[in-house]
Amino acid sequence: MLAQQKRNIKGFSLIELLVVVALIGVVAGVGFPQFSKWSKDREIRSQHEKIGTYLTSAVSHVERGSYPYIQIKFSIVSKENTVMVRGLPQEKFSFLLNQGTDLDCSDDNFSNTNGGIELLNETLSDKIEIFPSINDDKKFFSICFSKGGKYFKKTGNAVGVGVGPVGFESLTTPSYNYIVICSSGSTCNPTTPALDKFTYGIKYSRFGLIEKYKWSEVNGKWNSR
């Protein structure tokens, strides 16, 4: 009886296995490009959210009075894109004002010797690029916020040299205050028509308003996020 049951057990034929392998190959061939695009967009979107959070957090420090002056600096350190946030305590801030020091957005004003406190120092993904560029001779740009926007300043490539204004909404005046995040090797300059659908933008104001956008390749415009 047992021998009879063994003879009735059937496995897959070679042709059936080949058909299954072929179907798996077709499904993988169709699905992989979509998964690759999704993964690429997810990586850039994640970095976009991270940078937006750093800016929002820096502005919150100013609004709460934790630090009257805050610097967000984007630079290249050891060939890696980095972002650093430093705050100037009230005592040092008042001292510089009383001394008649020009409160610019330079590293000197936020150095340890001037009492600057490092609040964050993070490495960004190597799969993204940023505009204004930090890959040319200057290799950095900084944005500084103060309560009420009185001492709002920018340095490096963020000051507007070679950077055109962008209208993120059709009903507002084009702005020079923005950061664009795109995939590595693509064009991040928002004043060119070469942006792809994996491009995200952050607009900021001197008063600390942070707004996030995504570029629509279909409509050719920025959509608020």
Image (cartoon, rainbow, N blue to C red):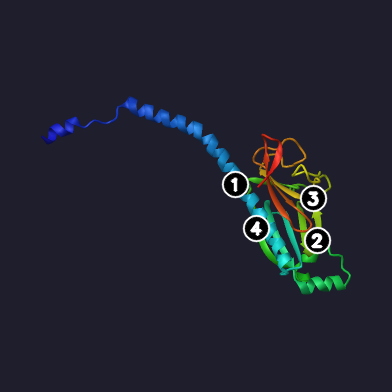
Q: Which mark is residue 43?
A: 1
Instruction: Using the rendered view, name the quadrant where residue 194 is placed.
Output: top right
The residue to which callout 2 is attached is 149
Of the numbered discs 2 and 3, the one sitting upstream in the chain is 2
Of the numbered discs 3 and 4, the one sitting upstream in the chain is 4
Give above or below for 26 relative to 191: above
Question: Which secondary structure, mark 4?
Answer: strand
Is 118 left or right of 149, judged from the image as shown? left
Of the numbered discs 1 and 3, the one sitting upstream in the chain is 1
Q: Position of residue 209 (x, y in %)?
A: 73, 56
Amino acid beneath label 2: Gly
What crowding class fits label 2: few (fewer than 14 Cα within 10 Å), some (14-19), or many (20 or more)? some
Between circles 1 and 3, the one closer to the viewer is 1
Q: CA distance from mark 2 to mark 1?
A: 32 Å
The residue to which callout 4 is attached is 122
Between circles 4 and 2, the one closer to the viewer is 2
Of the numbered discs 1 and 4, the one sitting upstream in the chain is 1
The residue to which callout 3 is attached is 157
Between circles 1 and 4, the one closer to the viewer is 1
Cβ atoms under marks 2 and 1 closer than 8 Å: no
Q: CA distance from mark 1 to mark 3?
A: 25 Å
Of the numbered discs 4 and 2, the one sitting upstream in the chain is 4
| Residue depicted at 78% across the width and 74% down the height | 91
Q: Closer to the camera, 212 or 184? A: 212
Amino acid beneath label 3: Asn
| Residue depicted at 13% across the width and 33% down the height | 3
